[in-house]
Image (cartoon, rainbow, N blue to C red):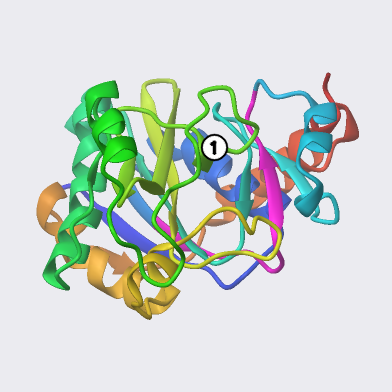
Amino acid sequence: MQRARLIIDPPSTGSWNMAVDQAILETADLTGLVTLRFYQWSQPTLSLGYFQKHADREQHPSSLNCPLVRRRTGGGAIVHDRELTYSLCVPSSNRWSSQNEELYDAIHKIIIGVFKEDGLTTALYRDSTAAANLAEHPPELHGIGNSPSPVDPKAFLCFRRRSPGDVVFNGHKIVGSAQRRLKNSLLQHGSVLYGKSSSAPELYGINDLSGSKYTFAELASRLLPSIENYLGTNMDRQNLTEPENIAVKRVQNSHFRNPKWLNRS
């Protein structure tokens, strides 16, 4: 059985959160560990996708007061606030490192399964036909009107875009993820949006849409056993290793706190 660990971090800054994910990926082959990490943000934080321009943030006035970080993964900007953020890193020795598409869908289907247990029908966003049907026949939402925000493939915010593997509920995107590979080790991280942020008031979480009361702690505890079962492993609660802590400080300084990295145009 592959060695595996669980890390649950307290709320922290954007630069630290992104540096930890990067450090875990860089040292995955050294530790040989499959690592599942659940984490939070110390304040509403805007993360730009790898290819976005710094000046693009002017497109979103509601988040201009948020601290900024730039991810190593692509996609649109995310306002990290009332969400569960997760990352899953598998070393090259693990078979899942070469099955990235299957792993991506599997984690999202596990999240869908948790909501299904509570009678909430979420689904993978697959194609334009599904989107058109939702637009023509908008379902009744919980106290916020009937129509989801318009989908825009070039929107500044990630949760205004749609990709085939996204998780949607009543036309609203509530889960989005991205992957990065390094030396054949694979990192997948993503956001499960459970509540609306005052820094992105146009986006609704699953609680806003359904009247549910999900929290970070509840989602983490319910997702863990299903992920363990899928990966065929038991995860021990652990902390970062010393080499990982060293790597976190290094990549924080070289990238995630570096103005040249943040302010790229």
Residue 69 lies left or right of residue 173; in this view the side is right
**Residue bounds of the magenta highlight:** 37-50
Identified at 71% across, 59% down, the residue is 199
In the depicted view, which residue is nearer to us: 226 or 149? 149
In the image, what residue occupies the spot 81% across and 53% down? Answer: 67
Give the residue type at disc 1.
Answer: Cys
The location of residue 29, given as percent across then percent down, is 39, 34
Q: Position of residue 146 (x, y in %)?
A: 39, 56
- Does residue 46 show up magenta in the picture? yes
Q: Seen in the image, is 90 located left or right of residue 216? A: left
- Please state which of residues 27 and 235 is positioned toward the viewer in this rendering: 235
Query: Is 48 in the magenta?
Result: yes
Which residue position is annotated with label 1? Answer: 158
Left or right position of 248 against 108: right
Q: Is residue 257 visible?
A: yes
x and y percentages locating residue 90 in the rendered image:
32, 39
